[in-house]
Amino acid sequence: MLELAARSRNIFKPGQGKTPALLVLMLVALFSVTQSNFLSTGNISNVAIQSSYLIIFALAQTYVMIVRGFDLSIGSTVSLISVASSMAMSHALGLGFSPAMAISSGVITGIAIGLVVGLINGVFVAVFRLNPFIVTLATMNICLGLASSISNGFQIFNLPDGLNATFYQGSILGIPVPVVAAFVLVGLIHVVLTQMKIGRSSYILGANPQAAFVAGIPVTSYLLLAYALCSALAACGAILLTARTGSGEPNLGGNLMLESIAAAVVGGASLRGGSGSAFTPVFGAVFITILSNGMNLSRIDGYIQQMILGAIIICTAFGEYKGRGS
Amino acid sequence: MSTVPSTCILETRSIGKRFDATIALQDVDFDLKSGEVHVLFGENGAGKSTLINLMAGTFGATKGELYFNGEQIHHSTPAVARHLGISAVFQEFSLVPQLTVAENIFLGREPARYGFIDGLKIDAGARRILKALDFSIDTTRIVGDLSRAEQQMVEIAKALLIEPRVLILDEPTASLTEAETEILFRNIARLKAAGVGIIYVSHRMPEIRALADRITVLRDGRKIATVDASRVSDDELVALMVGRQMDQLFPNVPCRPGRVRLSAHNLSIAQGDVRDASITLRAGEIVGVGGLVGCGKSEFVRALFGLEPLLAGDIIIDGQTIDNPTPADMLARKVCYFPADRNAEGLALPRNIIENSSVTAISTETLSRGPFLRKASERRMVDRIIEQLTIKPRQGGERVSSLSGGNRQKVMLARGLVRPTEIFLFDEPTVGIDVGAKLDVYKTIGNLVEAGHAVLLVSSDLTELLHLSHRMIVFKGGRIVGELEGARLNENEALSLFFADGPVLKAAAE
């Protein structure tokens, strides 16, 4: 019991959620004053559902950031998975499979593609020791090109009926499925990070890869697994997003690379590796979603929103740099 | 407050420096007279570097005052110090490897004509200063191609380009040969005669004897004493430095050699830093490995643990030949290596004491079940080790980055205790830690050997090697040049092996 209390206090250590939680509250205060419908039930549930996608992508990004990496390919992986799993589903329907079977085939295709992209990233980063910036920049372009070429640049329709109904409109105990999915994944990663050897090893190798090697940690395998896990999580998010739009979209990943990194960094993950938790991306993602929701309600131009997002990343990175320096 | 004597050129009054939570220097009164060589003496981490950096303006003091010629300097910067005529030669060079010798000597002070750097003037000036100092280095060579000794001489020439009033030398002979050292000493004598005040950081007794007028001893950031060099013995100096008599510092570990645990035959590593090295290490003994900086001793022990690529030779543990050693293999064979550079190779600084201590053992049955950690038993185990090694703070959740050097080293030691380790490879285990922590490390090593474990101790601290080793192996130029045992295990024999060729200034090992 005591340990549990100590653990929950840990979440609120400086840089581990306290600041982002405060930022979220400030934003809520600001927008609820300026926008009368900001606190309406409809908008709150809207923000919750929207946040859950970003939570999943930020969670994926946080995991690779813990091992001192990052994944620029996350957005285009999402596009590729959206297109490929949609094609699998509509093809399965065409072959006469039931909608449930078709959805399963889409999910399996999506996760498999996620794992393949993650393993490719992981092999080049972990085994060949290339810089994750270059590796994931390259796979970003490959995935983007693949997504556009296999779909000829068009959306893919004719998805199984149950997809949108289950994965977007469905709910469990009154909670929308995307929100449930986000929290299940956060819980899962929390257990991985705090209770499992892989999580512990990931922190150590992110904080100091050479020290991890000297201490006998199988650095290459865990680094590789981190990238695989990242893309697998992204695949889960991609399937949920596809269910929401109800079609396979070759540019579904659009802004996700920047947003997921922003959410992870705002939440408190460090580009220097070795820090961050499963909860930090939650705050970051909620913050960014509320920000963009509030700015939309305030009718702030989309391009200006992008500039604000960029500025926020720089500010938090600077804050983290100052924080470490003192 | 005493009046400043007329000859006193540089003085600090109760000067102090704090880095975050660490107090590097506290209440130090120091004065330098013109025309004297004032030696700063103390262990690693005693505050010598901090003090000279304060005087050279590298950073400001947190507390206290700095006077030059009796006038207080309020905000010292390197530029202010240079303007006053305070020149410093640090151990980390300030040279630009891509530029020539001449360009480096004039760096930041280039004579210009019509806004263009006057290359001819630079070259002529550089030649003049090098000739005056009796250093024979071609001024057109690229600094990156020079040996460390030559770079050291360029650095000194740079500091002396404009004759300073105060010259600070931080272990300048560390990379010089005897002949080069003699040239340096002649220059020091000339500067001294010209009234330059010289602050000389060193812990090599023979040099201190040859040069010092006065000696200030620092320990744990405080000034212990300032003494006249002519009125103090070597033993007294060392006792001042470590704060106790030598024989109290080292435990007396009985040698009960058992079976051979680890041996290496004709080991060579790819970079050529180690050639044909063979050793045997038995249970229940401490084998010391000594030699000068760069002799290959550290690379040798790293190679044993799989951290340097092997070119040839065999590593045998308990009778089994290990083909491609990796740290994970060696740990599984009950071998643990404790790196010299704890921060670069040992610790995950942003993580806590528990995680850093148990890291070598998270795959053992005690600490994990399948892929899951057993956090309760981990906590119990680390708490016990914190108690045993007196790690401070005692809270296992504390980040390692907030620990002192001594406590960081103890966290490293914990890694050998969390899993069944029987062969310990120590690489400079006491570098940069205070005397109290040293005692604890020595005690731990002693206990390990008494329990029948085998210890290989690589150290640059000759006193430590001589007092702890049962046998001592000496490296020179990547090869083992001798083994000392019994009555031959003494300073003279060791030093004559360290400097195996030709007559040598009898400097203590670095």
Image: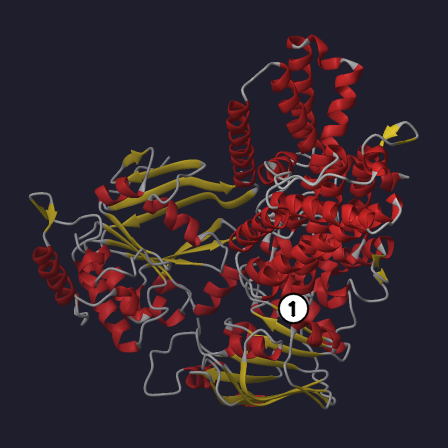
Total label count? 1
Q: Is residue B360 above or below residue B7?
A: below
Closer to us: B500 or B186: B500
Image point (30%, 70%), residue name: B149
* Res. B260 in view: yes
Asked which quadrant contains residue A50, the reply is top right
Q: Judge from the rendering whether residue B116 lies leftward or rightward of residue B414; answer left or right.
A: left
Residue topped by disc 1: B442
Q: Nearer the viewer, residue B506 or B31?
A: B506
Residue at 58% from the left image edge and 80% from the top image edge: B288
Q: Residues within 10 Å of mark 1 (few under 14, many from 20)?
A: many
**Looking at the picture, does residue B152 appear above or below residue A108?**
below
- State the residue in front, B274 or B380: B274
Image location (x, y in percent) of residue B141: 21, 68
Quarter of the image where the N terminus of chain B is located: top left
A130 relative to A15 in the view: left or right: left
Q: B336 left or right of A103?
A: left
Q: Percent position (x, y) of residue A300?
A: 56, 17
Residue displayed at 34% across by 34% down = B75
Coordinates of residue A60 in the picture (x, y in percent) = 69, 45
Can the viewer see residue B403? no
Residue B135's x, y, as percent?
19, 70
* Outermost residue toward the right in this view: A173
Residue A17 lies in what quarter of the image?
top right
Q: Quadrant of the C terminus of chain B?
A: bottom left
- Callout 1: SS: helix
Type of amino acid at the residue the image marks with label 1? Tyr
